[in-house]
Amino acid sequence: MAGTMRNTKIMEAVTQSTTVSKQGLFERAFAFAFKGLVYAQIWEDPVVDMEALEIQPDSRIITIASGGCNVLSYLVADPAQIIAVDLNTAHIALNKLKVAAALHLPDHAHFHRFFGQADSKQNLRAYKEHIRPHLDETSRSYWEGRDLAGRRRIGGFSSGLYKRGLLGGFIGTAHLLARLYKIDLKMMLTASTLEEQRAIFEQHLAPVFDKKFVRWLTDQPPALFGLGIPPAQFEALAGDEKMADVLRKRLEKLACDFEIRDNYFAWQAFGRGYGKGADTPLPPYLQAANYDLVRARAGRVEVEHANFVERLQASADASLDRYVLLDAQDWMNDQQLTLLWSEITRTARPGARVLFRTAAEPSLLPGRVPDELLGRWDYRAADSLGFTARDRSSIYGGVHLYVLK
C-alpha cells in the first residue's frame, strides 16, 4: 500500500493530461521512470544558491531534496535548519545516507572516497561499519535491496554511483552516441584554457547537433526523461526552437563559459564522475576545507518523504524564510502554482527569499499566480539574470529570486 501511495503522489505531480492522449501517455511513462533514482548528483549550482539566498544563522530553509548535494552544501552557510523534502523515495534514501555518512564516517578521507569517488569496495565496508547502524529501517532496506537490473543498490558506491540513475544513464547514452560519431567527450577535460574548451566544442561537439538522427531523437520527449525533464517541461524548454538547437546552446555554456578546472558539473557531464586528481573540482560539501563544518551541522538537516505543498500546509505561519523549489514549478498548472505561493506567503517570515529555476528563460509566475498574491513579492530581475549567467550546471534557462516585500 505504501508503495502504491508513493507512486500515486509522483503520478499526481507529473500528469496534467488524459490517459488516452499522447501527452498523457508520455507523462505516465515519465512518472514510472521517476520512481527510481534520478539524480545521484543534483544539477543546480549550490554556490549560486547560497549567494542568492543570503543564508543567515537564524535561517530556516525548506528545499526539494533531490540528490542531496545542495542540502549538505548549504550547511557551509550556517543556517539554523534545513528541511529537505522529496516525493522520490530513492532521493530520500540518498539524502539520509549522506547525512548519516557526514555524522558517522571517521574522517574526510572516508567521506570523500564514499561520495567523491563512489567507486571503491572499501565503501561497502565503511557502509557496514559506520553508516548502516545509524540508518532507519526504510533507508537500510532501500540500499540493501536490488534495482531493476538485479544489482544491490549500495553496490553503486563500489562501482561508480554517478553512472547510475536516470541522469547517469542519460549521460552514458550521450557518451555512447558521441562515440558512434567518433567523438570522445572526455577530451574536453584535457583543455587547459577557455580558448581550448571552445575550440574542442566548436570542432567536435557542436556539429553533432546537426546530425539528422540526433535532431530526430532529441525531438522525442522520452529521450530527455534521463535529464528529469517531464513532457510539460519539454515543451517549455523547446519553445519555438528545435530541441537539438536548445541543447546545443546549453552544452555550449557548460563547455565554454566556465573553466573546466572549476566546474564539477562539466566533470560529471564529460567524465562521468568527479575525477581522481587532488585539484578536481567538487561540490562544497565534499571539499576538505568544509568537512568539519558539514559534519558539525549535519544534525540540522531533516529529511522527509513529503509533498512540498503539504509540508508547507503543516507548517506554522511565518515559520520559514528560505525556499528552494528547484524546477518543480515547470511541472505545475496554474491552480497548483497558486496554492504553492499561497502557502509560501503564509509561512514566510519577513525578508523571506524564494529561489527556483525554469527550463525557459523568463519567470513563469506572472499571469499564472494572482496579482494580489504575487504582488507581495519583489522579483529581483537583474540579480536573477546574474545568477543565471553564473550557474555552472548550465542546464536551465533561468534562475529566479523573489523576496518578500
Image (tube, rainbow, N blue to C red):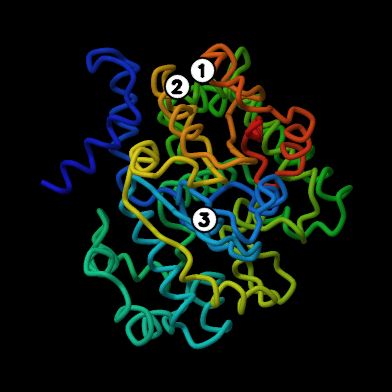
Residue found 54% across the figure and 71% down from its top: 297
Q: Determine contact: label 1, label 3, CB under 8 Å.
A: no
Q: Is residue 197 above or below residue 82?
A: above
Relative to 156, 211 lies left or right: right
Which of the two marks, 2 or 3, is nearer to us in this view? Answer: 2
Q: Which residue is mark 2?
A: 338
- The earlier-in-sequence mark between 2 and 3 is 3
Front residue of 329/43: it is 329
x then y, percent, for residue 2: 15, 48
Farthest-out residue, left:
1
Q: Which residue is mark 3?
A: 41
Q: Determine contact: label 2, label 1, CB under 8 Å.
A: yes
Q: Determine contact: label 2, label 3, CB under 8 Å.
A: no
Q: Is residue 295 above or below residue 81?
A: below
Q: Is residue 313 above or below residue 102?
A: above
x then y, percent, for residue 83: 45, 54
Residue found 62% across the figure and 64% down from its top: 78
Q: Amino acid at mark 2?
A: Thr
